[in-house]
Image (cartoon, grey):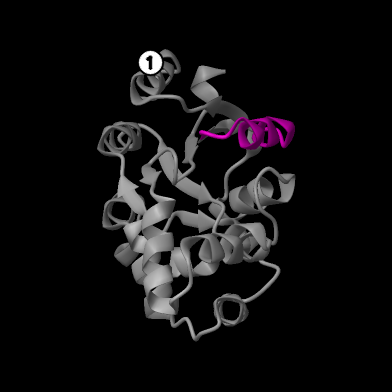
Amino acid sequence: MTASISLVLFDMEGVLSLSDRSARVDHLSAVSGQTPDVVRHAIWESGLEARADAGLITDDEYLTALGDLLGCRITRDDWLIARRASILPNAEVLALAEKVSAKRRIAVLTNNCRLVADNIEFLSPEVAALFGPHVCVSASFGAAKPAARAYLGCLEHLGAGTAETLFIDDAEANVAGAINAGLHGYRFVSADSLSEELERRQLM
């Protein structure tokens, strides 16, 4: 089993980076003049972010809908600056991924809209530098994790098979979804435990 892994597929936020939702909310609150509670509702509780992550709406439709919910126009720059503030590099895990890249292919599969993939150099220079063009967002495949379509679409894009791919995510549901789709799965808890798992599998 160990020798069969040729691709290690990482989740981004919660694994390769830490997520600071409050920073994103605070920026959009300042831009829109709305309270943080209104901003949180617009992004997550309204279902808008989930629709964008699943590729059910275009980037322009997403920004327009977000602006409508916040009562103002939200530009791409507004969104990107807020989003960048929420993505903090996890240096320990990035270092592990770099070690893996010496022996195996590495890539990213994250639940996000296409704006993230198209602007990854701005949003997370560290991830962009390490993974290059292999940062895949769920919206590109018409479904978000843990739907099988997200993983299978990503692997088809990357030219990899399910049995040769190890998927790493901090969300138990997403790891289960990967396993159900035929991939190997590992739930991320800490850099130390991930290091032990990668060593056990002889992936670095």
Task: Identify the residue shown where x is 44% and y is 54%.
Answer: 134
In the image, taking residue 190 as reference, residue 158 lies left or right, namely: right
Q: Is residue 179 magenta?
A: yes
| Residue situated in front as seen by the camera: 176 or 97 | 176
Question: Magenta residues?
Answer: 169-182
Q: Amino acid at mark 1?
A: Glu
Q: Is residue 12 above or below residue 55?
A: above
Residue 94 lies in the magenta-colored region? no
Q: Residue at x 48, y 67 (%)?
A: 35
Q: What secondary structure is found at the residue carrying circle 1?
A: helix
Q: Is residue 91 visible?
A: yes
Q: In the picture, residue 196 is in which quadrant?
A: top left
Disc 1: CA contacts within 10 A as few (<14), some (14-19) or many (>=20): few
Q: Residue at x 55, y 82 (%)?
A: 71
Q: Considering only vertical position in the picture, is 5 above or below 69?
A: above
- Residue appearing at x 30%, y 66% in the figure: 122
Q: Nearer the viewer, residue 147 or 30?
A: 30
Front residue of this view, candidates 158 and 109: 109
- Residue 147 falls left or right of residue 154: right
